[in-house]
Amino acid sequence: MKQIDLSVNIAGVRLKNPVIAASGTFGYGSEYARIFDVSVLGGICTKGLTLHPRAGNTGIRIWETPAGLMNSIGLENPGIPAFIEKELPQMRKLGPAVIANLSGSTVEEYAAGAALLNVSSVDMVELNISCPNVKAGGMAFGLDPETAAAVTSRVRRALNSKPLMVKLSPNAPAITAVGLACVNAGADALSLVNTFQAMAIDVKKRKPVFENISAGLSGPAIRPIALRMVWELCAAVTVPVVGMGGITCADDALEFLMAGAAAVQVGSATFAHPKTMLEIIAGIEFFMRHHSISSVKDLSIRT
């Protein structure tokens, strides 16, 4: 049969395979390099980065729930300047494509962070628009097409030498409309879904588990909904779409690739089983060989 080619191209960035470590679940890569050879991954998304350092949320940050995991980390990170100076050189040595996840609380903060990443050695920027817009009373940038387009456009102007991928929030009333608005504003690719808004109550203490009341739900519980959203978005846009949400095995990843995603991100599953992504890559290759499929893009069942 033909030679198997696992490589994919996302907005001009070549990945050796379609499996990417999701933001906030893999640190900067070196943390897992002691466990397995991370060079086999297609890409690594950094922890969420903001212009200035953030200490993150206080109180409980992680809470397990049936078939899922809730988190309220609060974007703890050293700030973009420190990332570029201390973390990025080590990430570049690991081998996979480096995708910087950019977060912020104002459009100005996003733009300033993008300008710094624009002259760095990252391969791509993933714009997290699930962050609260402090000038709009805390509503996330990604919930409204107009607001999402405004921050995407501003970041696009500051990021004129790097591909821009926008990470969409599943909490948007019309996620396809938000995705189209981001593409029209200059996004080269889209990724989805981010976590779903959820909450938990400690019945013994008779109070909410998280200090911020709500938290982000990830894990297998969200996969069918995430898959549906990826399917719908792939039908609406022409840019590459990176799918994620509850992927724990090769079959899960294949579902997203068959739905039209160009690549996938794996997050929460890594916490339970650090080598999950290695097994997914091997499983995708096995499936392709067994079904005589030579290219990842040919996995799509879209007509």
Image (cartoon, rainbow, N blue to C red):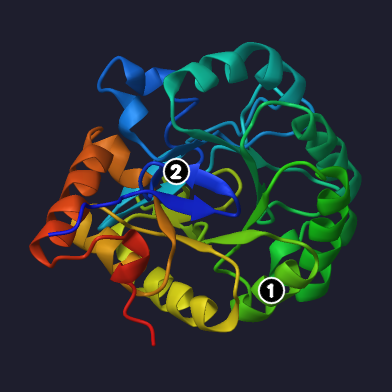
Q: Give the residue number, with chain letter if any, for mark 1.
A: 178
Provide the secondary structure element on which disc 1 rests. helix
Query: In this image, 94 relative to 2: left or right?
Result: right
Query: CB under 8 Å between callouts 2 and 1?
Result: no
Residue depth check, mark 2 versus mark 1: number of the one nearer the observer: 2
Residue furthest out toward the front: 2
Query: At which x and y percent is residue 36?
Result: 25, 23
Query: In this image, 302 relative to 169: left or right?
Result: left
Q: Residue at x 36, y 53 (%)?
A: 203
Query: In the image, what residue type sits under mark 1?
Result: Val
Which circle marks residue 15 in the picture? Answer: 2
Q: Residue at x 18, y 45 (%)?
A: 282
- Pick the quarter of the image with the N terminus: bottom left
User: Which quarter of the figure has residue 150?
Assistant: bottom right
Mark 2 burial class by Cα count in 10 Å: few <14, some 14-19, many 20+: many
User: Which quarter of the figure has residue 140?
Assistant: bottom right
113 versus 6 height, above or below: above
181 versus 201 height, above or below: below
302 and 217: which is toward the camera: 302
Residue furthest out toward the left: 290
Query: At which x and y percent is residue 238?
Result: 59, 74
- Residue 53 visible (yes or no): no
Q: Residue at x 44, y 43 (%)?
A: 15
The disc, 2 or 1, on the residue closer to the chain's N-terminal end is 2
